[in-house]
Image (spheres, rainbow, N blue to C red):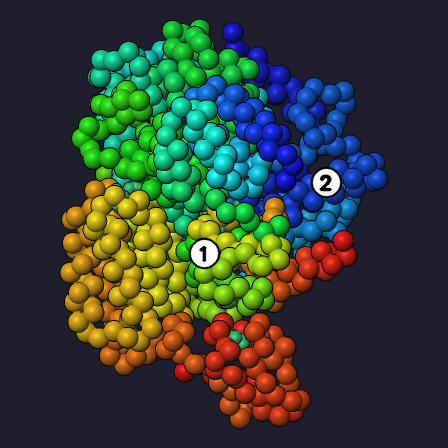
Amino acid sequence: MLDLKKITESVQKSLGNVTKRIIICAGTGCVANGSLKVFNAFIKSADELGVKISVELKEEKGKTNLLSKSGCQGFCQMGPLVNILPSGILYTKVKVEDVKEILEKSIKADEVIERLCYNDNGKVCKGQNEIPFYQKQSRMVLKQCGVVDPENIDEYIFDGGYRAAKKACIDMTDKEICDVVLAAGLRGRGGGGFPTGKKWDLTRVQQRDKKYIICNGDEGDPGAFMDRSVMEGNPHSVIEGMIIAAKAIGADEGYVYVRTEYGLAVERMKKAVEAAVQKGVLGKNIFGSAHNFTLHVMEGAGAFVCGEETALIASIEGKRGMPSPKPPFPAQSGLWEKPTAINNVETLATVPLVINYGADSFRQLGTPQSPGTKTFALTGQVLNTGLIEVPMGTTLRQVVFDTAGGVTDEKGKVDDKNFKAVQIGGPSGGCLTKEHLDLPLDFDSLKKVGAMVGSGGLVVMNQNTCMVKMAKFFMQFTQNESCGKCVLCREGTRQMLLMLEDITEGRADENTLTLLEKLAKAVQVGSLCGLGKTAPNPVLSTLRYFRDEYNAHVKDKRCPAGECSNLVNYSINDKCLGCTACARKCPVGAIAGTLKKQHVIDTVKCIKCGVCLDTCKFNAVVRG
Amino acid sequence: MEAGYSKFDRVCQIIEENNYDKSKLIPILQAVQNEYRYLPEEILAFIASSLRISPARVYGVATFFAHFTLKQKGKHIIKVCDGTACHVKKSTNLINTIKNKLALKDGEFTTKDMLFTLETVSCLGACGLAPVMVVDEDVFGQVTPDKVIQIIDSILKQEAAQ
Ligand SMILES: Cc1cc2nc3c(=O)[nH]c(=O)nc-3n(C[C@H](O)[C@H](O)[C@H](O)COP(=O)(O)O)c2cc1C
Ligand code: SF4
Ligand code: SF4
Ligand code: FES
Ligand code: FES
């Protein structure tokens, strides 16, 4: 039988021989930035320099340094990241050329290479605990993500992993588990915020021969990557949460449904399941208890609506992923008509924390109605984009100006006056503006202002973003993704999109706005599933907070943000010195002119990309 | 393509690996598409009869999911992310630049010489690096119209050298 203590001791012993540990971020963002090349360079250079390095944690004779990969460390934009323990030095934007120096200075000796550290307005930050982006967070669910090697189950166990599952399997009854989770006030992180304990209890009381637990890793929201990061960076925490959930509801089989675009998450989840089976954490009589649990990993096939629970179930059954009416709820009749509990990745990864620390401790963070923390994917026009985790109830101001380091202008410089809005909760959410900066981010207060936590996508926008265009963007998304079952969702969103197009392209009048609003309300009421019901949210909330901007498009045929290409034109004025810089950069060759003569833009050819505006050093390109 | 038999051999194998299980239709289509890079019509019919389900159901599933494609694609696939984060960081410019560079007309996604297919996807989950683009297997972050042209040019150069 699996002996957690023995594994912990053995890892402890192996770690005892490790002088320094070099953790290279191998999350999607850092890999895209070339972190695997950096990883390989470490192996090669260590060999050349005679620095002893192991790439696997095992008992060795004599001291060694350990080189390992991790999931996303959060600070994606500054990747590839290299974290060195125990000192906690964090190097950013590391290139293959830097590796030798790191080995020479920081591994052989204890020197810090300042040029590779994050620079906060002139202050060199040596490690995560000095970087504002990290200082302002409370990483609970993400604590191990970016630290442990996601492909090594022993490390997860060493870090306290699978204790909660063991406790749940051996020491707790199904009802006790539901009660603790309910008392902790854990609410689903997949968007709806439904109390997890309640959902489980509803499934638990069903007297049936077979039940299922499903982990929803579809994460179709554009701009969101929290679930992806957890599955990539700490897959065992998801498995552990599922074992506990399965015991709580009385299921012996489960599925992890992962979006197909998330190749790395699929791979790591599959490896983690295999390792768990090998160790006996999954399978029959887990931890010697009577609890059996088999877990499958299934890849989605690219349909946003499959994140909706009934649609997800249909697609596991091999059908088109179309939602079906509730009731019956999955808790009563789900996968193959058996009682089924569906939970989000982050919800499940939070469960072991609740079991380990108890309901009261869990409530230490967050607000009374929304306890705990929430991860957000922070993107858009801010200094630091990336993956963050803050207590529920943190204000928008804290997130945008402290954690994210402020709003940036078109050139990427921080300029907090440039703040315009935050789109939260993806296509089902709404937008928040200046007046909401001190609003606590939690399920209930966001709902009150017509937005929602949603899955946790948080896109910050500056004055150069057109809110109408943004609304149109989300409408286009939901329109594409509508499964077509409901007339109002299928046709209504199409008409809404056409109206928004009329507005951004200068063909609309005031009636369009009235009609748009009416139709939006009808779509909300007349759609079956959450996709249709929430599709109008971005439109309604921008209409509410940015009416002026809509009016400018409709009445004055003007786009104040300068984004709607039909309503803006680029031209070159007499400040032009004829340096040819813009002409060389224009991707479509729309700029003509000879050296030292004023250039001209061919407005027919021009795709209005704004590259010339960014390029011109003499402010000769104007947008109007 | 080789003789028809070997083509169905591989499909048979995939179906067998999935135990002729109807509920595994999606994983089966995925595996088949990995093999051929698209779902040829005759293979869809073959899968339907092997699994004893109607061709309409197979076709229905194959057309429902964005990941499945019934048309042959170009040799190099350029996926531009047009998710929220990338959109805010002006991914539309990248799309326009590529269309222009590859001389793709509206509604066309594959070049006539079958060298490139342009796709837009909604979020690749690397939003921190927006705008993001994937060319074949390589992910590129913080892409500019300039860089797009460079990337395409370098592929064209490689192709010409072959
Ligand atoms: C169109 C649509 C898409 C959804 N996509 C997701 C998703 O990607 N991930 C997710 O966890 N929940 C998604 N949901 C919510 C799920 O249906 C479900 O409420 C959730 O997985 C429950 O888990 P939780 O209680 O742990 O939040 C979506 C809902 C709708 C209507
Ligand atoms: S609301 Fe839209 S996505 Fe949902 S079932 Fe109806 S048509 Fe399909
Ligand atoms: S806006 Fe873009 S396409 Fe138009 S002239 Fe300037 S660089 Fe060329
Ligand atoms: S992927 Fe490396 S920090 Fe996010
Ligand atoms: S929005 Fe483009 S990668 Fe997420």
The residue at the point 19 percent across, 28 percent down is: A328
Residue A482: x percent and y percent? 31, 48
Image quarter of residue B133: bottom right
> Which numbered mark, 1 or 2, is in the foreground of this view?
1
Q: Amino acid at mark 2?
A: Asn
Looking at the picture, does residue A73 appear above or below residue A314? Answer: below
Label 1 – label 2 distance at C-alpha: 32 Å
What crowding class fits label 1: few (fewer than 14 Cα within 10 Å), some (14-19), or many (20 or more)? many
Would residue B106 be found to the left or right of residue A597 on screen? left
Tag 1 residue:
B82
Picture disc at residue A161: none
Residue A439: tell me if it is visible: no
Classify A574 as above or below A488.
below
Residue on which the image places disc 2 = A40
Q: Percent from the top left, x then y, of residue A280?
A: 51, 13
Compared with B22, A610 (above or below) is below
- Residue type at mark 1: give it: Asp
Looking at the rendered image, the quarter that the C terminus of chain A falls into is: bottom left
Secondary structure type for disc 1: loop
Q: Position of residue A53 (x, y in %)?
A: 74, 32
Q: Residues within 10 Å of mark 2 (few under 14, many from 20)?
A: few
User: Is the CB of mark 1 within 8 Å of ligand 5?
Assistant: yes
Q: Nearer the viewer, residue A257 or A293?
A: A257
